[in-house]
Image (cartoon, rainbow, N blue to C red):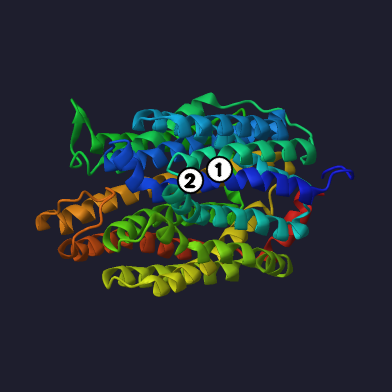
Amino acid sequence: MTSPQHNPWRALWALVLGFFMILVDSTIVSVATPALKAELDATYVQVIWVTSAYLLAYAIPLLVTGRLGDRFGPKNIYLGGLALFTASSLWCGLTDSIEMLIVARVLQGLGASMMTPQTMSVVTRTFAPRERGKAMALWGATAGAAMLVGPVLGGIIVQHAGWQWIFLVNIPVGIIAFALAMAWVPTLPTHSHAFDWFGVVLSMLGISFLTFGIQEGETYDWGTIAGWVSVPLLLASGIVFMAAFVWWQAKNVREPLVPLSLFKDRNFSVSSAGVATLSFTSIAFPFPFMLWAQSAMGWTPTQAGLVMSPMAVVAVVMSRPVGQLIDRGDPKPLAIYGSLLSASATALMISAMRVEAGYLPWLALFLLVGLGNALLWSPLATNATFNLPMNLAGAGSGVYNSMRQMGAVIGSAAISAAITMAVARNVSSTGMTATPGSNVVLPPGQVRPFSIAMSESLYLVLAAYIVGFVIIAMMAPRAALEPQATATRT
């Protein structure tokens, strides 16, 4: 626990400010897709890589950065990551080429990967299990709201200030977040760890090959990329490396990167898989919606972003009552209701896109999906950490956040492939002159096939919500975990 002179709530508020900023950057680029494509003379796939490069650099180091927090202190690692993130945000805003923007986004992702595990680790180490619901509700609401605020804030900024400012706005926020963390976050005891660098390499290769293969597959017609390298070979290699990573973690007799004993805790395993599917959906669906809203409906970036605002509002408003419900009872029913609500809203979105529904129906649909997600983020985070021993707080946080970010990485890559295939199937034969994602409103005759294409890509999001529901249904009731949590901390 933290020392008496430190207020854990002040520390948490300081941390979630930076956490909010790095998660906003996971989705804020989606609304700038047309502007980036036009102003930087980029291809559609290159623009998607602006997000994917960030998510990939964010996800891969998480298993290590969680341990770094245990070894050198979560406060120190958090501050170092925040400094790197803020400096690379300046580079993003000043660059004038798509290639340099992607490189700068990689550095942003590395900074974010240093910060994220420390936020969850501090919550686990400074709040008692029965007091953790409200704290995790704030953490979960921050994650949910940030991934939804991104498109809203991005739309306003892109339309009125230019795409560069979606990155430059991070600089004053980063400076404030750094000062608050210096003042309010306590210095916690450290634990020595041996770092599994072989495991790092295996996981890095596995995730990278899988992501590149999924995202670039349609670009190369799922065939040869260069010489003997092919998309199927990349995907197969990614699977082999990930299998080798799991095997090595089981065989490592010193200190594995991922202690497989974590997964003996049923709810940690279920919650980690559940948050991966939730993150997949949160990253995936803004891309087809933003393309459809701006290219088919002719909405401005601000209009397209603001129509998603009910999701962020609900996430904030519901954080306190959801946290209270978690502390008083079992998070499992909340998560089940949330997954059903979000899946139903997505199914209705598919229909709304096909009939080219107007602004008011979309506001209602985003309110519904926002309510569903508000019932998902916090219960998953709370159940994942409820039974963790203190010496595995950093590792558990790293694994949980790695699963969340891996879901985002795969979601970004998969939706890119889904959109490309849907457009090729429905739009190419109509003689479309405007490339999807360009800053052009489609002629009336091309709106219908494009709307169908974007709605078909949302089937992927609906499938992810259904998978998430099945996973969440396997959670153990809270009552079954109480004796274990008590024994773990005594």
State the image quarter where residue 330 is shown. Answer: bottom right
Of the numbered discs in the image, which one, if any, rests on residue 26?
Answer: 2
Of the numbered discs in the image, which one, if any, rests on residue 349?
Answer: none
Q: How many marks?
A: 2
Residue drawn at (42%, 50%) of the image: 159
Residue 268, image x, y percentages: 59, 52
- Looking at the image, residue 243 lies above or below residue 23: above
Of the pair 278 and 30, the residue shown nearer to us: 30
The CA distance from mark 1 to mark 2 is: 7 Å
Residue type at the position of mark 2 = Ser
As drawn, is 145 to the left or to the right of 328? left
Is label 1 in contact with label 2 (beta carbons under 8 Å)? yes
Of the pair 349 and 466, the residue shown nearer to us: 349
Residue 162, image x, y percentages: 43, 43
Q: Can residue 43 be seen in this view?
A: yes
As drawn, is 234 to the left or to the right of 83? left
Determine the secondary structure under disc 2. Answer: helix
Q: For mark 1, what is the residue?
A: 22
Residue drawn at (52%, 55%) of the image: 149
Residue drawn at (41%, 65%) of the image: 466
Of the pair 396 and 441, the residue shown nearer to us: 441
